[in-house]
Image: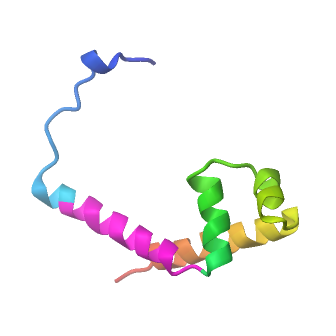
Amino acid sequence: MFVPLEEWDAGTPPDQEDTLVVRDALRRYEEAIAALPERTRLVFLLKRADDLTYPQIAKRLGITLWTVQYHMKRALTHLDRTLNHDD
């Protein structure tokens, strides 16, 4: 369903606690990405931030498709372990 932006009502603005929770989650996500090995981080960001396909990433970096898949799996495993553990 498409709702024009002018008609969209986001409801009440988030309270300060919600804002802090979101900021903390974003900080943890950015730290987890920064902790990735350089090549793994680059592959991850080319996929997620630049929306390149695996073949496009492989061509751009001069690596095999298998290597792109390896780095994406490595990145996603790291992010899952880092962000979804109980503190």
Residue drawn at the location 14% of the way across and 60% of the way down? 17
Give the percent coordinates (x, y) of residue 54: 77, 55
Quadrant in which residue 80 is drawn:
bottom right
Q: Measured from the top left, where is residue 6 in percent x and y? A: 26, 17
Q: Is residue 24 magenta?
A: yes
The answer to whether residue 84 shows anywhere in this view is no
Residue 5 visible in the current orientation: yes
Whether residue 87 sits left or right of residue 40 in the image: it is: left
On the image, the x and y values in percent for residue 7 come to 26, 16
Among the 4 quarters of the image, the one containing residue 13: top left
State whether the magenta stretch is mostly helix, strand or loop: helix
Number of residue marks? 0
Residue at image coords 16%, 47%: 14
Q: Is residue 4 above or below residue 57?
A: above
The answer to whether 13 is drawn above or below residue 30 in the figure is above
| Image height of 71 relative to 16, above or below | below
Residue 23 in the figure: left or right of residue 29: left
- Residue 39 lies in quadrant: bottom right
Horizontally, is 65 left or right of 5 in the view?
right
Pick the front one: 19 or 40: 40
Residue 46 placed where, x, y %? 64, 57
In screen coordinates, is 28 left or right of 33?
Answer: left
Q: Nearer the viewer, residue 9 or 29?
A: 29
Assign the C terminus to one quadrant of the image: bottom left
Q: Which residues are magenta?
A: 20-36
Q: Residue at x 83, y 57 (%)?
A: 59
> How is the structure coloured here?
rainbow
Q: Any magenta on residue 58?
A: no
The image quadrant where one finds the N terminus is top left
